[in-house]
């Protein structure tokens, strides 16, 4: 039955279709020494994007291990997803089974595709290979992410009972299960909250698809990892490194993560994901993606004046819950988005927020799936035009049919991005003349949502600045004044849009609305405190 209708095989086919739909294509590269490597590569490599190599571990193939991550990173990176040797469609006739050899083959594969510089993400065994690649080719590797990868284990750890399973043959039997019972054992080791009650027919189907090829060679890979492995023989890498670890990892205990951090030194930081085991990329995909984006994307393009926590728009609010005295107060941290806390505050207060349409994304922002997930937008922006993709032919905001125009004049074209601030000043100064409040606010929103993305990009290497420091400060002042006259939800939309574009135009430092942004954050926090106090008083 499993051979006639394979659920695992069907799922694998869907993953292939998804990878192809996402802009990748399947390739095989002959490295000319009896080695052939399979890799998913971009259908169109874009020189403007950096390259990112996603290296899998034991278990299901690379598509299953990284499928949930693609849409987060594809818009920002040229993604490469290879099959390591003896996995998937990659193989070699060479006898070398070390992770160093795997790393050299990966580097040759990337060179064959014209990639000279890249960042790495390695899961479990893939982390061993990624670490070796960073050590051997420091000039080619920019950043490294190691996920639950026991790079700093030593051979003596096996003898001293550091692992729950110390016998390598037994380890191989679990990592390459040949029976449903062994696969159940692997699931218990890999997950903090394993799924129980999976029928044996499904487990046997999985084994038939993923665990029947290159068994001997994979056992040799496992033995090569621990053979004469000592900490003082492991080189130290110098690239910025993020270490991700599941708090309840039973395959590579958390202590190995801290050992790896100490070994690398100041260039490494570790993030421990709670209630997660070894397969945290599958068990906690959102947290996994969040940490990757913060490290890979935001740290490479973030102005130093903005903190990474603010950029992710996932603020952690704290307040004193029981006392007015600083010394006796207890602090509770709520690591949720502002919109979530706003909804909770209305619940605490026994009221409900006023209903209003929501938008799926901010007009004018990057429509890609990897955009920052900001606070929820509670104002409909179907009538708010975003900026034209061409900065040299941008239409000024125009009123809807039947409405009184807000600004008295609007240019048909702006010939240069740096000329837009002057027009924006005129628009802002003329707001509120002869219109009712609702129309004034609508005009302000149109102006801000249309022009903020352009302003952030105006001096981003495409145009020489033509405004003086006084003029730039004047534009920032007007912007802040206009934003502060909007409703809280509208401020949230505008400032989220500004933060998105200001962050990713890394060479621009203007307009800097940080003071307005901070003021809004403090005001929103005060609202939450008010509702929280009201709730606790009852």
Image: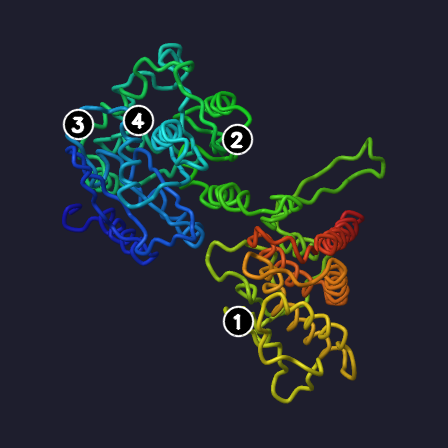
For numbered disc 3, what is the local secondary structure? loop
Above or below 437: residue 13: above
Asked whether, in this view, residue 534 is left or right of residue 306, the answer is right
Name the residue beneath numbered marker 2.
270
Residue 174 position in % (x across, y down): 28, 27
Q: Is residue 457 at least partly visible in the picture?
A: yes
The residue that label 1 is drawn on is: 388
Q: Secondary structure at mark 2?
A: strand
Secondary element at tag 1: loop
How far is mark 2 from mark 1, CA to CA?
Answer: 41 Å
Q: Nearer the viewer, mark 4 or mark 1?
A: 1
Structural crowding at the residue carrying mark 3, measured as other residues with C-alpha within 10 Å and reported as few (<14), some (14–19) or many (≥20)? few
148 in relation to 109, above or below = above
Residue at disc 4, secondary structure? helix
Q: Disc 4 versus disc 1: distance between alpha carbons?
A: 49 Å
* Rendered image: mark on residue 99: 4
- How far apart marks 3 and 4 lie (CA) works out to 13 Å
Label 4, residues with CA under 10 Å away: few <14, some 14-19, many ≥20:
many
Expressed as whole percent of the image width and height from the top left, the position of residue 414 reads 59, 74
Q: Which residue is mark 3?
A: 94
Q: Does the residue at mark 3 contact the one at mark 4 (Cβ under 8 Å)?
A: no
Relative horizontal placement of residue 377, taking residue 56 as reference (left or right): right
Residue plotted at (39% across, 29% down): 131
Tag shown at residue 482: none
Q: Is residue 172 visible?
A: no
């Amino acid at each position: 039955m499993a051979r006639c209708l394979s659920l695992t095989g069907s799922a694998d086919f869907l993953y292939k279709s998804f990878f192809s739909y996402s802009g990748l294509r399947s390739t095989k590269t002959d490295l000319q020494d009896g080695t052939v490597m399979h890799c998913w590569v971009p259908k169109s490599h874009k020189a403007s994007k950096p390259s990112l190599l996603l290296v899998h571990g034991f278990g299901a193939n690379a598509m299953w291990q990284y499928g949930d991550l693609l849409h987060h990173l594809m818009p920002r990176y040229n993604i490469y997803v290879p099959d390591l040797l003896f996995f998937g469609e990659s193989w070699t006739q060479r006898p070398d089974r070390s992770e160093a050899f795997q790393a050299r083959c990966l580097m040759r594969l990337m060179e064959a595709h014209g990639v000279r510089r890249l960042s790495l993400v390695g899961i479990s065994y893939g982390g061993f290979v990624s670490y070796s690649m960073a050590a051997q080719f420091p000039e080619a590797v920019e950043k490294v992410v190691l996920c639950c990868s026991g790079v700093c284990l030593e051979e003596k750890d096996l003898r001293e009972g550091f692992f729950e399973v110390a016998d390598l043959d037994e380890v191989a039997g679990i990592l390459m299960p040949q029976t449903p019972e062994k696969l159940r054992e692997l699931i218990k080791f890999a997950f903090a909250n394993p799924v129980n009650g999976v029928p044996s027919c499904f487990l046997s189907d999985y084994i038939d698809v993923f665990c029947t090829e290159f068994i001997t060679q994979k056992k040799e890979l496992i033995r090569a990892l621990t053979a004469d492995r000592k900490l003082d023989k492991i080189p130290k890498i110098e690239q910025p490194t993020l270490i991700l670890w599941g708090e309840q990892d039973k395959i590579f205990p958390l202590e190995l993560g801290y050992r790896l951090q100490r070994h690398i030194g100041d260039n490494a930081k570790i993030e421990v994901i709670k209630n997660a085991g070894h397969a945290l990329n599958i068990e906690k995909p959102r947290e996994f993606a969040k940490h990757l984006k913060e490290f890979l994307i935001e740290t490479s393009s973030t102005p130093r004046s903005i903190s990474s926590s603010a950029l992710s728009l996932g603020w952690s609010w704290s307040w004193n819950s029981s006392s007015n005295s600083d010394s006796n107060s207890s602090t509770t941290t709520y690591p949720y988005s502002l919109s979530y806390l706003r909804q909770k505050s209305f619940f605490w207060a026994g009221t409900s927020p006023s209903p209003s349409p929501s938008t799926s994304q901010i007009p004018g922002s990057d429509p890609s799936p990897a955009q920052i997930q900001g606070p929820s937008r509670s104002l409909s922006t179907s009538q708010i035009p975003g900026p034209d993709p061409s900065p040299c032919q941008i239409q000024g905001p125009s009123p809807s049919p039947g409405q009184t125009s807000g600004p008295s004049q609007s240019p048909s074209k702006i010939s240069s991005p740096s000329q837009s601030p002057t027009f924006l000043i005129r628009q802002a100064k003329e707001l509120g003349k002869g219109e009712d409040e609702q129309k004034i606010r609508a005009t302000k929103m149109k102006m801000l949502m249309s022009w903020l993305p352009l302003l952030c990009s105006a001096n981003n290497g495409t145009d020489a600045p033509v405004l003086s420091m006084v003029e730039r400060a004047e534009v920032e002042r007007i912007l802040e004044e206009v934003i502060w006259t909007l409703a809280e939800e509208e401020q949230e939309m505008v400032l989220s849009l500004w933060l998105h574009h200001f962050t990713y135009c890394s060479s621009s430092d203007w307009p800097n609305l940080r003071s307005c942004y901070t003021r809004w954050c403090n005001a929103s926090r005060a609202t939450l405190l008010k509702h929280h106090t009201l709730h606790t008083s009852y």
